[in-house]
Image: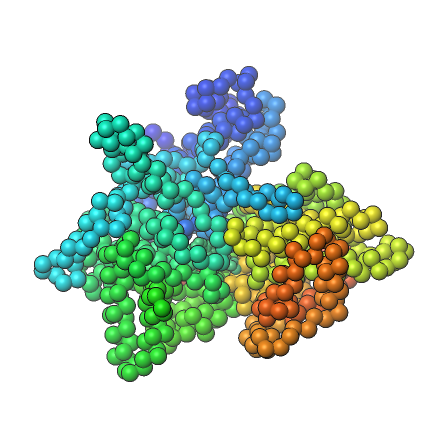
Amino acid sequence: FRAYSHSEIARDAATIKNSVVMHLTTTFLRTPDSMDSGHAYLASAFSVRDRLLQRWNLTNEYHSNIGAKTIYYMSLEFLVGRTFDNALLALQLRDEYAGVLGDVGFRLEDIIDEERDAALGNGGLGRLAACYVDSMASSNYPGWGYGLRYRYGMFQQQIINGYQVEAPDCWLDSPNPWEFPRADVTYPVKFYGHLVRDPEVSYRYKWESNVVYDAMAFDMPVPGYGTENVGNIRLWSCKTNGLFDLNKFNAGDYQGATGGQVAAQILTDVLYPNDNTNEGKELRLRQEFLFCSATLQDIIARFKKTGKPMTQLPELAAIQLNDTHPTLGIPELMRILIDEEGLSWDEAWDTTTKTFAFTNHTVLPEAMEKWPVPMMDKILPRHMGIIYDINLFFLQSVEERFPKDRELLRNISIIEESNSQQVRMAYLACVGSHKVNGVAAIHSDIIKQTIFKDFVRIQGEDKFINKTNGVSPRRWVNECNPDMSRLITEAVGDRSWINDLTKLKVLESKVDDKEFRQSWWEAKQKNKARLAEYILATTGINVSPDALFDVQVKRIHEYKRQLMNILGVIYRYHRLKQMSAAERTKELHRVVVFAGKAAAGYWVAKQVIKLINSVAEVVNSDEEIGDVLKVVFIPDYSVTAAEYIIPASDISQHISTAGTEASGTSNMKFVLNGGIILGTVDGANIEIGEEVGEEQIFFFGCLAHEVDEFRHYLRFHQPKPDEALQAAFDMIQSNTFGDAHIFQPLIDAVLCGGDVYLLTVDFPSYVEAHKAVEAAYRQHDDWVTKSILSVSRMAKFSSDRAVQEYAEEIWNIEPAPVGKST
Ligand code: 26M
């Protein structure tokens, strides 16, 4: 029997009101008279969630009935942000809920603002995972994300006395309508222990251990837009296996009785707040394994229901590794297939490599995951053994083809033979996968020439491919920019562009339409006014929406060069101070916006935040300068903050040292929202430039292939700052922004530390590029043209396109829309 069917989502006000009141009174034990906006949010959210869960059930029932091949996107991070508005838009119930809430005196915008972000990620990699599950659901691909349910997500950033201070993100302190606990979906995960060899098969073992944790599933429904499909992110939460030690309790050891519980929970307590750095902490390794083991057990349990032989797993499941963090999934699948399912080594290896594919997201050496062999051997003895065997067979096959090349074998070995041996996770991921991809064209080229060079030679060119990143048009246009979205819908004639960004092309025909251009400009101005309010509320700083909004928001990292940006601001301030008042009145007004978090232990990045805030304080209170220049550091950058900031930018900066930013994804979001990029020839900036045309983007700086030579030179020669950069240094050193000695290490990194990120090399062309931006912005009409043309040419950067490419070229899966056959 079926209690509901796909057509039965009620849209009438009475039914919606009933379900909201039902939740208010029965889920939250409140009455309509005592409803505050917090409970108005919760009751509305639970009523929307009911509808999503119905579709969730239908989707999964349908996919299992038709035996659809499913993609499992394994990621230690999912940076989802808020869900309420996203779900309302996907179900096309936004106006209906606005009406019902309006009747009882609430504005939908205020209710939406009650929701806390699900901040289970650091930055680009985590947000990409969220965009990809959004696209899978919206494009009807059977696909699940798998991750961890951290009790504390990305820390909250406070700015105190100009410094970053971290506070815990207790996002689960209030009820979370967007997760569904599944106590029945729980798997045991072992650690430590010892191995017993199988008397018959030399490579088969029994792994015995008393240290067993339980991983319990929580499902987050992912609404597909304009479809009945609802996707899923399954997150694991850890607890001890075997509940409670009654013996200890009876002996009066009350704490000891629950001690294991506390120890286990630590595994999913907190997201490591590192972005592009690897700390090599033991707890992180245990986190990664808990995740991989629970996920593989779950995938296999689902597969076994089909009754098919294990060697057919790749026909029903594709697993994508989001960077190396979930790489232990490879030896874990090998262990299950060999030790538990009785496959031979060769069958297991063939099945495993056909199932896994791997995405690399960074080339920074400090981000490469390596685990000390003794640590891995202690915590995961069976997996260490399997990794040794994978490596042995791999090296043997290479030796056959390249006899006596000792250097080659050393270079490609999964085990690095340093003072202490280390497992190179990127190599393990590569050897265990049938496809390896980078995330933008230049990045995919670079990894083929650097870390995977020898693997390309051995395993062939075809294994190494490019999948340029994309972003969800639902969240990053339709949701965050309603005014521009309305204009696009008018131009296109309907909302079809939200699932098909190639429709943006029609905007090109509007570029000479006076009325359209005016509305386009007004939409941007409105977004700027909205951001100005947000800035006032979060920082107390007053900025004018009439100024040029110049924005750099992303994780704070040396390679992203926020330091170069603030030095540029200091140089601008220096010039303004040298001008006469009359000259200053001719200057273009500018608001420079920064936001972003520094990893808690990344001292240099934290000093950069302090410098930005110190400059802001001096500049913003300088009466001579007034509105000509404002500098703002918006605290606690998040998905929700990004949804305010990105639609309001005129120019955004993506200025990494060439060759260091794998792709970048906010660059795509900014241009999709009518902003223009000031950037280096790096990552996806390059492909954005190719699509929108060189008139629509401001490039500067040295090229990736020149970087090595510059770095080499600067190792042996004193860097020479140009006059502009020297002026900025001088201003800092003369205590203009407070005690100079706290900033001296930042200057020393450039002048005495080899200037690894090439500030002295790129600063002159950076200053020139700013001048070009300014001249262009003054040509108001041309600027609007650039903005409209850019958006019209951005189709490539939809995550729908990216996911479709993965589906066709890596996963070999097809869309399976629900509802057509029910
Ligand atoms: C590693 C070890 C221990 C703890 C944390 C990490 C870790 C976490 C996140 C390492 C790297 C992490 O993220 C890297 C990242 O976000 N890379 C970005 O990926 C984006 C999506 O592909 C790209 O757009 C960015 O250019 C790239 O920097």
Q: Quadrant of residue 62?
A: top left
Q: Quadrant of residue 406?
A: bottom left
Tally of numbered tags: 0
**Residue plotted at (33% across, 41% down):** 264
Q: Nearer the viewer, residue 146 or 291?
A: 291
Q: Position of residue 235 (x, y in %)?
A: 38, 43
Q: Position of residue 810 (x, y in %)?
A: 38, 61
Q: Is residue 599 above or below residue 681?
A: above
> Residue pushed farthest bottom?
404
Instruction: Decide if residue 299 is in sight here.
Output: no
Q: Quadrant of residue 668?
A: bottom right
Q: Is residue 202 above or below residue 477?
A: below
Q: Nearer the viewer, residue 66 or 454?
A: 454
Q: Position of residue 688 (x, y in %)?
A: 59, 62
**11 left or right, relative to 491:** left
**Residue plotted at (75% across, 59% down):** 734
**120 left or right, relative to 114:** left
Q: Is residue 400 above or below residue 81?
A: below
Q: How is the structure coloured here?
A: rainbow
**Residue plotted at (42% across, 31% down):** 50
Q: Nearer the viewer, residue 808 or 777?
A: 777
Q: Position of residue 211 (x, y in %)?
A: 25, 45
Specify the quadrant that holds the N terminus.
top left
Q: Nearer the viewer, residue 388 or 141?
A: 388
Specify the quadrant that holds the C terminus.
top left
Instruction: Decide if residue 626 is in sight here.
Output: yes
**489 left or right, relative to 819:** right
**Residue plotted at (45% across, 72% down):** 450
